[in-house]
Image (spheres, helix red, strand yellow):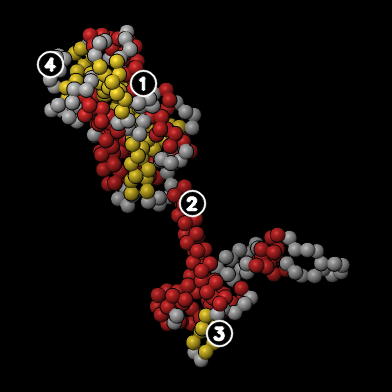
Amino acid sequence: MDTDGDAPLCKAAWAAPCCGIIDAPTARERLCMLIDEELTLKKLETFLAFMRSGNLGRAASELSTSAVSVHRAIHSLENALRCPLFKHEGRQLIPLESAYVLEKKARQLLQDAEQMVRQTREAAGFYAERFRLGALYSLTVKTVPKLVMGLKLRRSELNIDLTLGSNVDLLHRLKNHELDAILVSLDDSINDPACEHLALFSDDIFLAVPTDSPFAAQAEVDLADLADSTFITLTQGFATHRDGARVFEQAGFEPKVAMQVNDIFTLLSMVSSGVGYALLPGRIAAVYENRVRLIALQPRYRLQQHIGAVFLKAREREPNLLALLAECRMYSREG
């Protein structure tokens, strides 16, 4: 690559002083001797085009240039490498073993260079083609589809990877740069100095019962009346597991837990089958609505989950993230 500042050093690396013994070359000088300033990625692309086509004219057509320019680039590469790449047989250029070695290495070099540019720009948030979004299972009923649809309208070229999990798991992935943003419950675990958040909405906790339960017709329920009942819960790490434990503590009893599951939809299926009751957020009311009822808790037991988007402060200016946050603000206002 052409760098004016390096050129004098490369050309003078072996220049002898007026007197005395020549010092051994430095590491930088050795690099200059090996990598000539005429050795550029553009010339390597031209060389590979010729190796693919085997003909100056076809290579020129592929590159939208002239056969003379292709020949000049190949000759320049030979000068830069200080060795021949081809032998002449009439008007033909026949590749030597050195050309095949260069072809293999140049192809890998160009692939690495393309990946370097892409990943560097993605890290800076420019022209990233993929957005990695994490969310709670329960948010896939309404919130995630609406936000994803809005994000795709803003950035149609964007591919969105969705990862579902618990508050704890998603935050861990976010901080390890495995996710670009997460949609979670804004509880104490999210109070991390490296993170920023944007509130979306608040959601009450309800008692989920099958439609044939004696509690299904009630407008609200005294949770203490279910002290002898069987419950199903999410595993630890989920916000709903933690919030349920707080509600049970307020009710003055420890629930009889028949089963712990890893996603809210399996939990709903167990409730609808009569395996047990559960404490769940109101946002999942539309799921199994013909087989599961959500009953309000008496005011003394009521607890809200606050849902929001969480992201790393260091990445708050990334265009894709800014587009998601704009959709989150619209969603919050529509409430």
Mark 3 and 2 residues: CB-CB less than 8 Å, in contact?
A: no
Q: Position of residue 266 (x, y in %)?
A: 25, 30
> What residue is shown with label 3?
87
- Badge 3: few (under 14), some or many (20 or more) residues near its Cα, within 10 Å? few
Residue, x 58% and y 69% (percent of image)? 39
Amino acid tagged 1: Arg
Residue at mark 1: 242
**Is residue 237 visible to us here?**
yes
Neighbor class of circle 1 (other Cα within 10 Å; few <14, some 14-19, many 20+) is some
Gap between marks 1 and 3 measured at Cα: 75 Å
Relative height, residue 295 to residue 149 (above, below): above
Which secondary structure, mark 1?
helix
- 104 and 91: which is toward the camera: 104
Placement of 63 over or under 199, stated as above or below = below
Distance from the alpha carbon under mark 2 to that under mark 4: 58 Å
Distance between mark 3 and mark 2 Cα atoms: 40 Å
Q: Secondary structure at mark 3?
A: strand
